[in-house]
Image (cartoon, grey):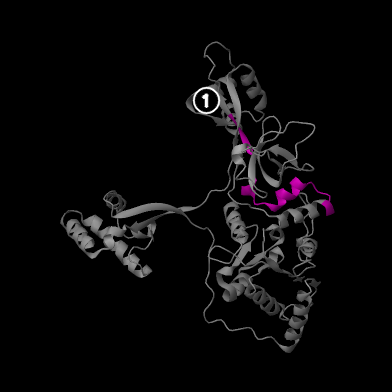
Amino acid sequence: MERKTYFVDIILPLPVPGVFTYRVPFEFNDWISPGVRVVVQFGRRKIYAGLVKELHERIPENYTPKYILAILDSEPVVYEKQFALWKWISDYYLAPLGAVMNAALPTAFKLSSESRLLLNPDFVPGEITLNEKEAAILVSLQNNDAISLSQAAEISDQKKVFPIIKGLIEKGVVLMEEELQDKYKAKKQSFVQLEEVYLEEENMRGLFEELEKKAFKQLEILMGYMHLAQIAGKSNAVIRKKALLAKIENGAAALKSLEKKGVFKVFEQQVSRLISLAKSKEVEDIVLSPAQNNAFIEIQDVLKEKTTCLLHGITGSGKTEIYIKAMAQAVAQGKQVLYLLPEIALTSQIVNRLRVYFGEKVGVYHSRYNIHERVEIWNRVLKEKEGEMSYQIILTARSGIFLPFKNLGLIIVDEEHDSSYKQFDPAPRYHARDIDFFNGKDKGSFG
């Protein structure tokens, strides 16, 4: 069977116009799809993680495209709706698509390469004369597999290190290569679980008798595990290793011995950095005043038409209660909600208030989160169906407009006149409220 030759149009995280076409190696045919990140070479040396915008079979006419080097994702991190939004922003604000991508994606998704210096395997010491700064870099490379350009600058005590590196390359002393830097690191924790064979009472009794005679510390670990498992409500519950060892002095060696004996299995598992809060069990339903109820009814009529409306009210007039009612309606329909606030208004008070009603369905996305937390929020929004790892309501400032909602049903822009919704630098220079008008055309939005 003849294999198809595919090409991909890729957006690179650079302020350059248009997309760039690369060829897909045959072995990637079954894995490539729009919205996944791929590793490509751009220019003579640099390597980037770009986004596949389109997969097609059109052969470029005037040049031979390079191959993509790797696929970074097993499923898309961006979907067609986001690409359509990026295209509108690019056209409306006259910004390169790569600049829009840079603004939209969490920093950890935008991988680029870092140059490293390696010792040339053909270099023969003593045959070439080196100055003091070149010699210092050589000594470092003889003791390390590779060094970065910043390390070379520090070693040579020279801010402008490129002339020195150029000289070393020309003399055949070093080679320069590009290494892709992955900025996101999944958080992992160690867990302990009792092997199923010891769920049988006879086997557990025999284990206790054995440990009582000659391994009291191991017995202490076993009893500690059973106590935590009882609290968890399952005989072979998965228990955090840190929690198990917390009150047992020097217990790590004993746990290791039990693992070798096949009593416990110890394993690492990815965990979230995000805090999940359960919905309050005693929360009372919001009762709207006649004026609030009239406004809510009018908003419902507007949202049925999937258009936009303005809710006007002074501070303290009860707009938030109307928001919560509208959110509850959207959530009940299985829809996602985007709730934009000015950065200064994104306080723990409003977050906690919404979590009282919606619990762990509420996520927050703002500049105070680190790059790892932003990736995890992005991935939770990306989940199509409600579940343990998904968010249905996102509270966010300006940057949240780019989150990859797949089932967005309601957009709320609080204090829509606030100047903090404008992005001035760097490009694209956009207004989040106007982008939400575009986003809300077929969904329903108000502010």
Residue 429 visible in the displayed image: no
**What residue is pinned by disc 1?**
141
> On screen, 275 above or below 322?
above
Q: Residue at x 63, y 52 (%)?
A: 77
Q: Residue at x 58, y 19 (%)?
A: 173
Q: Position of residue 212 (x, y in %)?
A: 18, 59
Quarter of the figure that contains the C terminus: bottom right
Residue placed furthest toward the front: 1
Residue placed furthest toward the left: 213
Q: How many marks?
A: 1
Q: Residues within 10 Å of mark 1 (few under 14, many from 20)?
A: some
**Front-most of residues 319 and 229:** 229
Residue placed furthest toward the bottom: 290
Whether residue 157 sits left or right of residue 18 in the image: it is: left
> On screen, 350 above or below 433?
below
Q: Position of residue 158 (x, y in %)?
A: 63, 28
Q: Position of residue 162 (x, y in %)?
A: 66, 26
Whether residue 92 sits left or right of residue 128 in the image: it is: right
Q: Residue at x 62, y 61 (%)?
A: 381
Query: What's under tag 1, amino acid-wise?
Result: Leu
- Residue 416: in magenta span: no
Label 1 element class: helix
Q: Position of residue 400 (x, y in %)?
A: 69, 60
Residue 401 visible in the displayed image: yes
> On screen, 264 above or below 298?
above
> On screen, 267 above or below 343?
above
Q: Write down the quadrant of residue 439 in the picture.
A: bottom right
**Front-most of residues 321 and 47:** 47
Q: Write down the quadrant of residue 316 in the picture.
A: bottom right
- Residue 101: in magenta span: yes
Specify start and end residues of the magenta stretch as a single range.
91-116
